[in-house]
Amino acid sequence: MSEKPAGRTILASGIAKGFIEEVENGVKALGRSPKLVGFLANEDPAAQMYADWTGKTSESLGFTYELRVVKKDDLEEAIIEANEDDAIDGIMVYFPVFGNRQDQYLQQVVSLEKDVEGLNHKYIQNMYHNVRFLDAEESQKSILPCTPLAVVKILEYLGAYNNLLPYGNRLYGKQVVVVNRSEIVGRPLAALLANDGATVFSVDLDGIQRFTRGEGLKLKRHQVVDVDSTLEEVSKNADVIVTGVPSANYKFPKEFVKDGAIVVNFSSEKNFNPDVKERASLYVPMIGKVTIAMLLRNLLRLASNRSSKK
Amino acid sequence: MSEKPAGRTILASGIAKGFIEEVENGVKALGRSPKLVGFLANEDPAAQMYADWTGKTSESLGFTYELRVVKKDDLEEAIIEANEDDAIDGIMVYFPVFGNRQDQYLQQVVSLEKDVEGLNHKYIQNMYHNVRFLDAEESQKSILPCTPLAVVKILEYLGAYNNLLPYGNRLYGKQVVVVNRSEIVGRPLAALLANDGATVFSVDLDGIQRFTRGEGLKLKRHQVVDVDSTLEEVSKNADVIVTGVPSANYKFPKEFVKDGAIVVNFSSEKNFNPDVKERASLYVPMIGKVTIAMLLRNLLRLASNRSSKK
């Protein structure tokens, strides 16, 4: 009996490298240092760490970063001030703040023009409908939400996208499982991958939905149906498995992974045991560094949008 | 010992009457029948009942109503079609559909110009900031969310607002308790009442916040602070107690109600026992008929906005 070859772990830092360079060059080409303001209104040490890390990365690439620590009840006013401040190109808020739907309200207070995370309703709706620009003249690019975009870029890097296929259909024939259907990451990600031609099984506690590219002439968007299959059934044929379960106790069952599959975890918890590499060919345990590269890529895009508007 | 006088029950139907007439006359003055489309995408009998009831009421007042029953995965596309249909003045969706944050996404798909429920982020943000118009020319009126607006109108009807005080300060000196701090009703309501001069204690499971009218020159909005008091402490001086706890088991403790207080329940469950009238002077057990009058008032306003835009 021959031993199965072990899969490889691919680190986000390596994947991020190319994007980091692209962003750094973009800042040089722009000829000024776009300014990002982060708002911290909780006492979560993880948020503080993430803030420090955003600051360090963005400063190192030529951006200007300012962290504003505010009381939660002053946050809305602080965001509005930043919206109106011409010296600021991008705004991000370290959530959770209130930990309930008021956080979604606050996210929408960030102006469309400065929303580096791509979470404004307009951006999300454009993403679902494959709309790439904000204006009819196509001078203002729409922004994609950072984390789903990071996963897409990672899958491109790992070769899940086939470059011989036409753009917009490069996941054709691929089956993908996404375990998480949050509004922030899981559902947008399933839609993005389906828009690129994949058959995506979106899994959460309520059940499994299948996302495929719609044929509707009008909206050019994915179609969604509920399916009766189990996680095991949809996983055993999956070329790609992406997880984002925010629980230390959750582990994706290794035995559901097809030999040679690509597995990516975007949760801050480790949703796979390292022995998943006995099955998976490529394993990305964390994606944070790519996500931050996408954040700065969005910031650069917003700065360019502003330039082209003037 | 003299027996305490029993308080009165005031029914929403009586309160709604004046608004219903106002709306009916408004339709006549407009000279055409504004069209409301309701979307039903769940199998909740309560939603079906509410839809039937909206239909009946709106038709009886001169509006045109159409119920569109769609599958939940087709709802977004159906809303977009209605957004683009010039024959439609207003759109409402009977939630819950998915029962999670996707419902908030769908709510925001309804276009600003047709959002009769006043739940678009722009309307909510305008409400929090006391902004009454959508445009600098003040030709397009902003819409208030139906249920909080209904409670305000009820409190005006019940005399909690003092008409001798200047407009915008007619709750001055009043202390109000609102039990519910949802993004849809409780928090906007607390803000509306604080913007009108009241001191509002907003209560939910996480604690109690005090809303007062802010003094900020810039935003003219309410201010919020966390307070350490108990429900009993904030209630015993409350002139008005408003509840909206969606649980059959919850009852507001009668002994917390000040003699002569006004009590209003906007939950579909009965948050007060009828014996609350041993303490309360006026008791409004349900508000649905006023809410629907506000919905149609909003529809009329949207129809007028459209007319003044042309």
Image: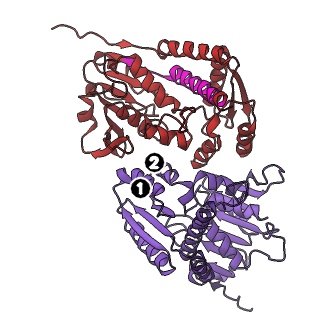
Chain colours: A purple, B red
Q: Secondary structure at mark 1?
A: loop
> To which chain does the residue with label 2 belong?
A
Q: Is residue A264 magenta?
A: no
- Judge from the rendering whether residue B283 lies leftward or rightward of residue B122; answer left or right: left
Residue kind at label 2, given as amino acid type:
Gln
Can marks 1 and 2 be said to lie on one chain?
yes
Split into 4 quadrants, where in the image is the C terminus of chain A?
Answer: bottom right
Looking at this view, name the residue that lies furthest to the left. Answer: B1
Where does label 2 land, which residue? A102
Pointer 1 and pointer 2: residues touching (CB < 8 Å)? yes
Q: Is residue B299 magenta?
A: yes
Q: Residue at x 64, y 34 (%)?
A: B114
Please provide percent x and percent y for residue A291: 56, 71
The part of the chain drawn in magenta is: B283-306
Vertical arrangement, residue B112 with respect to residue A266, above or below? above
Front residue of this view, candidates A207 and A127? A127
The tag on residue A97 is 1
Q: Residues within 10 Å of mark 1 (few under 14, many from 20)?
A: many
Looking at this view, name the residue that lies furthest to the front. Answer: A310
Please provide percent x and percent y for residue B224: 33, 44
> To which chain does the residue with label 1 belong?
A
